[in-house]
Amino acid sequence: MKKFWTPFRIIATVVVLSLVAVFASCNSNEVTPTSTTPAQPGVAESRNSTTPPLTPVPPTVMEAQLHAVDGSSIKLSSYSGKVLLVNLWATWCGPCRMETPELVRLHKEFQPRGVEMIGLSTEDPAGSEASVRDFVRAFNVDYRIGWATPEVALALMQGRSSIPQSFVITREGRILKRFIGFSPTATPPQLRQALEDALAAKG
């Protein structure tokens, strides 16, 4: 009688389960807490006159010294007075890889108008430095890339651990729009509109 758990079946099962775990952990069907629409990945919350004031980025996040892939440091407070897009991502995340070319296009479009963009990997810098560098080269990323500390990632995510997550931050350091997940059709135009709104906003 043949054994069911042959070495080949064990390896195949481990591979399949690993792939399921990876995609389940980074694909998001969530929206921001104030949204009343059905869950759609990559769709931002909408605001109206009854919506509370924009949420300030916590000082612990603004003042954190974050390690950048080029060896320098990143501090969000040094971008005060500019519109900022912060993207939380990881090299192993499928939706993040789909989103990156769109972010590169948006950066080329909006940087001349004063918008800064920063991508922060949620991976451990010690174990992901080579893969992050390879990712930057493969996708021709021309905006700043670094790593979010666990404290910074948790403060920004506010209990929603799915990635990618993007935050459009006003010149005054307040979160105008938050995007969780990525939709190829919905996210790029909404990100573009959010950046336009942030640029047009009065102080």
Image: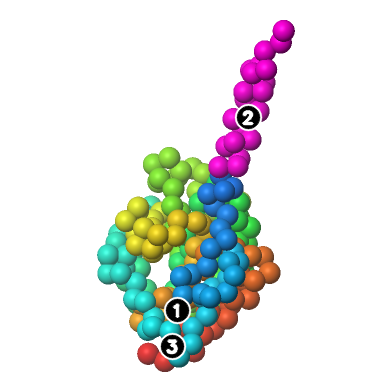
- Residue 169's spot in the image, x, y percent? 42, 75
Q: What residue is at 39 percent from the left and 41 percent from the top? A: 126
Q: Between residues 102 and 130, which one lies in front from this camera angle?
A: 102
Q: Which residue is mark 1?
A: 176
> Which label is found at residue 130?
none
Q: What residue is at 46 percent from the left and 43 percent from the top? A: 128
Q: Between residues 155 and 203, which one lies in front from this camera angle?
A: 155
Tell me the element at label 2.
helix
User: Residue placed farthest to the front in the image?
Assistant: 1
Q: Report the predominant secondary structure element of the magenta stretch.
A: helix
Q: Earlier in the sequence, mark 2 or mark 3?
A: 2
Q: CA distance from mark 2 to mark 3?
A: 50 Å
Q: Is residue 101 magenta?
A: no
Q: Quadrant of the N terminus?
A: top right
Q: Disc 2 marks which amino acid?
A: Thr
What is the quadrant of residue 29 in the picture? bottom right
> Which label is found at residue 50?
3
Q: Residues within 10 Å of mark 2 (few under 14, many from 20)?
A: few
Q: What residue is at 44 percent from the left and 48 percent from the top? A: 123
Q: Disc 3 marks which amino acid?
A: Thr
